């Protein structure tokens, strides 16, 4: 092995240790420069039409991007609250069982009644939790769990 290659791992090791140290001491990033503007969950789907019905029809989100292979839905009241559904191009059905998305809404009781009326797959009945939220879970058509909640005053 030449000298250039043997030096690289040592430099990398020093770099990683410095990064971990800076991260722990909060010197990793100047938070005055960078702002996180949004975080968008992405879910793969074998049926984009069912996703349209669920996210637009049930949740009332606006379809803001439809490119036939990607759908992005946004809250009508808070347009940075978004979720993206991507067409699954693989032969295997996507496994979205580990996806768990929490959505805070203004009236969880009305949404719960709507879910029952539309025969949504309710996987956790409406409950007041000891930590101050009222919530229920539904499965989206892709197998992801959607936690719909309201904070209790």
Image (cartoon, grey):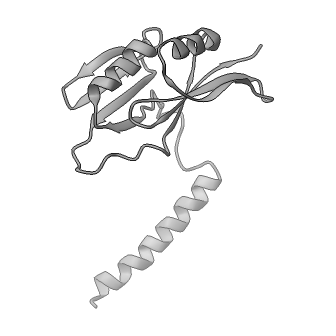
Please report the residue visible at 62 percent of the width from the left and 25 percent of the height from the top: 136
Residue in the image at 44% along x and 78% along y: 10
Residue visible at 58% across and 11% down in the picture: 113
Give the x, y percent position of residue 58. 44, 15
How far across and down, in percent of the image, does residue 59 sit? 46, 16
Image quadrant in which you'd find residue 4: bottom left
Q: Is residue 2 left or right of residue 12?
A: left
| Residue 40 in which image quadrant | top left
In the rendered view, tell whether residue 111 sits above or below residue 21. above
Identity of the residue drawn at 29% across and 35% down: 86
Whether residue 29 sits left or right of residue 95 in the image: it is: right
Q: Position of residue 106 (x, y in %)?
A: 60, 10
Of all residues, the one furthest to the bottom in this rendering is 1
Q: Residue furthest left?
A: 68
- 99 is higher (above) or lower (below) than 137: below
**How many numbered marks, from 0 up?**
0
Query: Quarter holding the C terminus?
Result: top right
Examine the rendered structure and indicate whether residue 57 appears above or below residue 18. Answer: above
Which quadrant, please, contains the N terminus?
Answer: bottom left
The furthest residue to the right: 130
Residue 11 is situated, as x and y percent measured from the top left of the image, at 42, 74
Front-most of residues 27 and 1: 1
Closer to the camera in the image, 96 or 79: 96
State whether residue 9 is above or below residue 129: below
């Amino acid at each position: 092995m030449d000298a250039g290659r043997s030096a690289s791992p040592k430099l990398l090791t020093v770099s990683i240790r410095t990064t971990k140290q800076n991260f722990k001491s909060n010197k990793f990033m100047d938070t005055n420069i960078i702002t996180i503007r949004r975080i968008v969950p992405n879910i793969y789907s074998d049926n984009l039409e069912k996703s349209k019905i669920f996210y637009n029809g049930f949740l009332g989100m606006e379809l803001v991007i439809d490119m036939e292979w990607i759908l992005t839905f946004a809250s009508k009241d808070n347009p940075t609250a978004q979720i993206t559904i991507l067409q699954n191009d693989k032969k295997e059905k996507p496994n979205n069982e580990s996806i768990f998305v929490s959505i805070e809404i203004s009236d969880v009781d009305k949404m719960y009644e709507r879910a029952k009326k539309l025969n949504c797959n309710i996987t956790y009945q409406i409950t007041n939790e000891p930590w101050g939220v009222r919530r229920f879970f539904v499965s989206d058509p892709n197998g992801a769990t959607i936690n719909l909640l309201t904070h209790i005053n």
